[in-house]
Image (cartoon, helix red, strand yellow):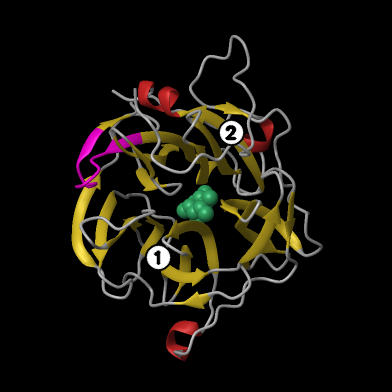
């Protein structure tokens, strides 16, 4: 039996799997948890990240405004379900104007490493790349160097150093909507210089992960390996369809894939996943875990419009892979 390696977190959101439900990941019955217009100026709130913070939770939320500019905002919650999100976007502190000059920010992830919370996001710098910042209080965010050259999206830090280095999985991309994409692994001694790039995995022809794949939530450490929930994209005659899958990566050499899901673990089925600004998208960006029970709560963007919550367990995910 695989065990989650982390502190117990008994207060994460949770609902039991509905009876007769045929799948490894089930939706929260009151989805979506965050409506598109939670903020006065928001067009949509989706692809967002939550972490345990103090006696509740904090998060960084993708809120596109009514000019359709992509911005990320801080939020807090007592129970991980009801969120209050700040009206104003995060203003990063940077002493280098070259890095601090803001273009756009989207699809944040938040990782706690030692005593800091690190935010990574898709950052506009002559095209999309991976922005990195840290905070201790979710008030002041200190921006570091961009991790990579453009073009890259979906930079996700591991929650601890691997082989003595910070570690990140990401998906190199292009200037547009990127009709290709593999997941790569990189290491850095200082969160400034990144190298030791390794290929992790590619799309699989024929099916839900055939066009491109990208890392989702912060990888979950288990006794068997890193559980990496990811998104996989199929190109239909009507455009991209985004699904959720899961892979198990080697603990010490995370570019080595032990197993991965042949079938998706969640696909756009519900109306709020199939209808919105970009139809047919489930896009996971965060997961809360309770090591005691093996419970996992996944935050995911729905149709690039609202935010949903879904549940699974470490055993369910282990059984979803071949
Ligand atoms: C990806 C990203 C995501 C988005 C998805 C579907 O390329 O831009 O933010 O959810 O496309 O539109």
For the residue pair 284 and 82, the one nearer the viewer reads as: 82
Left or right: 105 as drawn, with respect to 114? right
Quarter of the picture containing the C terminus is top left
Horizontally, residue 174 falls left or right of residue 310, namely: left
Residue drawn at (23%, 40%) of the image: 250
- SS category of the residue bearing label 1: loop
How packed is label 1: few (under 14 Cα within 10 Å), some, or many (20 or more)? few
Q: Which type of secondary structure does the marked residue at label 2 adopt?
A: strand
**Residue at disc 2, CB closer than 8 Å to ligand 1:** no
Q: Residue at x 54, y 82 (%)?
A: 93
Position above or below: 167 against 13: below
**Label 2 environment density (alpha carbons within 10 Å; few <14, some 14–19, many ≥20):** many
Residue 114 image point, x, y percent: 41, 61
**What is the C-alpha distance between the residues marked 2 and 1?**
31 Å
Q: Say which residue label 1 marks.
A: 175
Counting from the top left corner in percent of width and height, residue 226 is at 32, 41
CB atoms at circles 2 and 1 under 8 Å apart?
Answer: no
Relative placement, left or right, of 95 versus 163 is: right
Q: Quadrant of residue 131?
A: bottom left
Give the quarter of the image for residue 209: top left
**Lateral position of residue 225 relative to residue 133, left or right:** left
235 vs 107, nearest the viewer: 107
Query: Which region shows up in magenta?
Result: 247-258
The part of the image, by quadrant, that contains residue 190 is bottom left
- The tag on residue 141 is none
Asked if residue 8 is positioned above or below residue 263 in the image, the reply reads below
Residue 257 among those drawn in magenta: yes
| Residue identified by numbered label 2 | 310
In the image, residue 58 lies in the stretch drawn in magenta: no
Asked if the residue at label 1 sits under 8 Å from ligand 1, the reply is: no
The mark that comes first in sequence, 2 or 1, is 1
């Amino acid at each position: 039996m695989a065990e989650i390696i982390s502190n117990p977190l008994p207060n994460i959101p949770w609902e039991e799997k509905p009876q007769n439900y045929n799948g490894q990941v089930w939706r929260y019955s009151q989805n979506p948890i965050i409506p598109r217009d939670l903020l006065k100026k928001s067009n949509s709130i989706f692809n967002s990240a939550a972490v345990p913070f103090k006696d509740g939770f904090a998060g960084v939320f993708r809120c596109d405004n009514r000019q359709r500019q992509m911005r990320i905002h801080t939020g807090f919650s007592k129970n991980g379900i009801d969120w209050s999100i700040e009206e104003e976007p995060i203003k990063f502190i940077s002493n280098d104007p070259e890095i601090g000059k803001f273009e756009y920010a989207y699809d944040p992830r938040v990782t706690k490493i030692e005593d800091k919370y690190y935010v990574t996001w898709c950052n506009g710098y002559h095209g999309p790349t991976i922005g990195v910042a840290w905070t201790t209080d979710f008030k002041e965010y200190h921006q570091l160097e961009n991790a990579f050259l453009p073009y890259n999206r979906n930079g996700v830090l591991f929650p601890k150093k691997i082989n003595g280095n910070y570690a990140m999985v990401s998906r190199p991309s292009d200037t547009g909507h990127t009709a290709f994409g593999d997941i790569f692994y990189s290491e850095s001694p200082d969160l400034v210089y990144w190298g030791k790039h390794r290929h992790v995995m590619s799309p699989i022809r024929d099916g839900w992960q055939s066009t491109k794949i990208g890392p989702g939530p912060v990888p979950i450490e288990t006794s068997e390996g890193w559980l990496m929930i990811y998104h996989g994209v199929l190109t239909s005659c009507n455009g991209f369809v985004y699904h959720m899958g899961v892979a198990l990566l080697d603990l010490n050499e995370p570019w080595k894939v032990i197993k991965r899901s042949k079938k998706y673990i969640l696909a756009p089925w519900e109306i709020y996943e199939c209808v919105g600004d970009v139809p047919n998208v489930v896009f996971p960006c965060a997961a809360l875990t309770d090591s005691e029970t093996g419970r996992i709560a996944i935050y995911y963007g729905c149709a690039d419009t609202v935010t949903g919550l879904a549940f699974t367990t470490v055993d369910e995910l282990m059984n979803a892979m071949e």
